[in-house]
Image (spheres, rainbow, N blue to C red):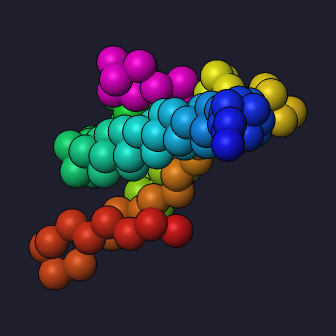
Amino acid sequence: MNSKGQTLVMFIIFVPIFLLLFAFMVDTSFLIEEKIKLTHVTKDILKTTFDLKDQETIKALYEKNEIPIKNLKITFDDAEVHLANSYEISSIFGQIIGLKKYKVKVQMKAILKNDQLEIYKE
């Protein structure tokens, strides 16, 4: 019995599916990497600039880490600092299914309690 035809059909069916899954994994990994980078940079900025409460220093630190500040929102209260930032990254393979950009965002606040800085995600 000759099964070359069956193998070819299975190959033609499964190769595009595997390519789409691989593309989705690559896009998702870039999105997760950007989210982790934004979260860690925001935590570091809150730790280093909590006492300064200077918007220009915060903006400069984001730019130094190559993070866009177009949608950056900074709020200072008595013993709190709120940072919210969001930006879009281009999708490499998501354009196949209509996703041209992914949105990366973070909202965090730092509160001084009992002489210790506590950082929360909002």
User: Residue 87 occupies which quadrant of the picture?
Assistant: top right
Q: 15 or 74: which is nearer to us?
A: 15
Q: Is residue 114 magenta?
A: no
Q: Quadrant of residue 63?
A: top left
Classify 51 as above or below 100.
below
Residue closest to the far bottom: 114
Q: Residue furthest left?
A: 115
Q: Quadrant of residue 98?
A: top right
Q: Is residue 67 magenta?
A: yes
Q: Is residue 23 above or below residue 116?
A: above
Q: Position of residue 80 (x, y in %)?
A: 39, 64
Q: Residue at x 55, y 27 (%)?
A: 69
Residue found at the far right of this picture? 98
Q: Is residue 38 visible?
A: no
Residue 19 lies, in percent from the top left, at: 62, 32
Residue 68 visible here: yes
Quarter of the rendering occupied by the N terminus:
top right
Determine the main secondary structure of the stretch shown in magenta.
loop
Image x and y of residue 4, in percent? 67, 31
**Seen in the image, is 119 located left or right of residue 86?**
left
Q: Tell me the residue at 46%/45% (across/down).
A: 32
Left or right: 96 as drawn, with respect to 22: right
Give the magenta-colored segment's residue range: 61-71
Q: Residue at x 83, y 35 (%)?
A: 97
Out of 64 and 114, give the one closest to the viewer. 64
Q: Count the marks.
A: 0
- Towards the viewer: 91 or 61: 91
Q: Residue at x 41, y 19 (%)?
A: 66
Residue sitting at the far front: 1
